[in-house]
Amino acid sequence: MSKKKNEKQTISRNKLLKVAGFGWLFDAMDVGILSFVIAALAIELQLTPTEMGWIGSVNSIGMAVGAFVFGVFSDRVGRKNIFMITLIVFSVANGLSAFTTSLAAFMVLRFIVGMGLGGELPVASTLVSESVAAHERGRVVVLLESFWAGGWLLAALISYFVIPTYGWRVALLITAIPALYAIYLRIHLPDSPRFTAKKEQEKGSVWQNIKTVWSKQYKRRTLMLWIVWFTVVFSYYGMFLWLPSVMTMKGFSLIKSFEYVLIMTLAQLPGYFTAAWLIERAGRKFVLAAYLTGTAISALVFGNADTTMMLIISGMFLSFFNLGAWGALYAYSPEQYPTVVRGTGTGMAAAVGRLGGVLGPLLVGMMLSNGSSINTIFSIFCGAILVGVLAVVFLGTETKQLELD
């Protein structure tokens, strides 16, 4: 009987991972496509570096709003409902953005896309975290994050084969497919068993939940998460949204830049898988701090790379460590709070992080416009990531295999 029960749990866990993971994959495909679309738009519309930076930043403003709003309401109406809504929002808006004819209209739709994307990610990780046994929770959430690499890989392939021949509009239309997938999710995705087990009177109001996150019991954890989320998202979007453009600035053609970024993207998968293997053995704090340190070093080397080989190798390590750290962060964040405020706490941390995602691309655009070098810009990202490492080490609490409340 025990064996059959374990098999049933494994099937349920694997099904949840697949269903939520494909939603995550489509999100990553959207973000990945944007980095390539920005490079193509810059040529078509003769955009300045500052305008290019604003495209990435308005997307992150939407993500900040979405992470907060949808995170808070996931504690009121459930993880599954919010997961569904956010997926449809970003898919439809993304498809519509393919028909825009002005930068202003494109940016408005990117804000809406960002809202859906920003809300979906913390809610999906919370849903999976609450549905998996403690001894494998961290590993499964990191594996969920690994779908992000698959999405980026698809984005790189679509950009490499589609954009140069058919244009960026066709590439964006392809990413609208998740709207159809949302219908399938509504039928087959179960809600969090921990959330559904909570009685209505146990669920506080939106304002009560926000106050709880900053109460004496949780304020140290909240401060730690906000610092880490801000530094990680600030550096990630500052570096990765500009990656194809940085490659062209270093003298490579648009097609060659897409090719090299595709190679770098492949390194994300072993980054996730090694983090998934380590997180239940070495713990969340060690994996997060170690992979963030590796990211900082790789960013420094990438910014100062003066040969093609060094550029590709350091870019691959940057992808390896940065995305492994993302996996650990998504596993670590929901474990900081009890079920009744888990969506609120995780969503608020993600929202603060998205503010970093606003500043990162803008900073790169402004610094490039002012004549700053690539190595100076990447040195700033290196320093920011190290601040996140210190927050994890000195403020973080280990939550490995801890039973969720």
Image: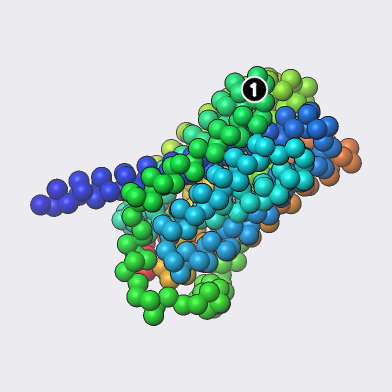
Classify residue 375 as left or right of residue 405: right
Q: Is residue 349 visible?
A: no
Pick the front one: 118 or 362: 118
Whether residue 85 is situated above or below residue 296 in the rendered picture: below
Rendering coords of residue 28 (x, y %): 54, 40
Using the image as rendered, state which of residue 115 and residue 236 is in the foreground: 115
Residue 185, position as x, y percentages in the image: 39, 48
- Compare residues 39 and 245 and report the one nearer the observer: 39
Residue drawn where x is 61% and y is 35% of the image: 172
> Residue at the spot x=67%, y=47% of the render?
109
Type of the residue with mark 1: Tyr
Which quadrant would residue 14 be assigned to in this image?
A: top left
Residue at (44, 66) in percent of width and height: 77
When asked about the image quadrant of residue 405, the answer is bottom left
Q: Which residue is mark 1?
A: 166
Q: Quadrant of residue 302?
A: top right
Residue 123: where, in percent of width, then height?
A: 48, 57
Where is 163 relative to 124, above or below?
Answer: above
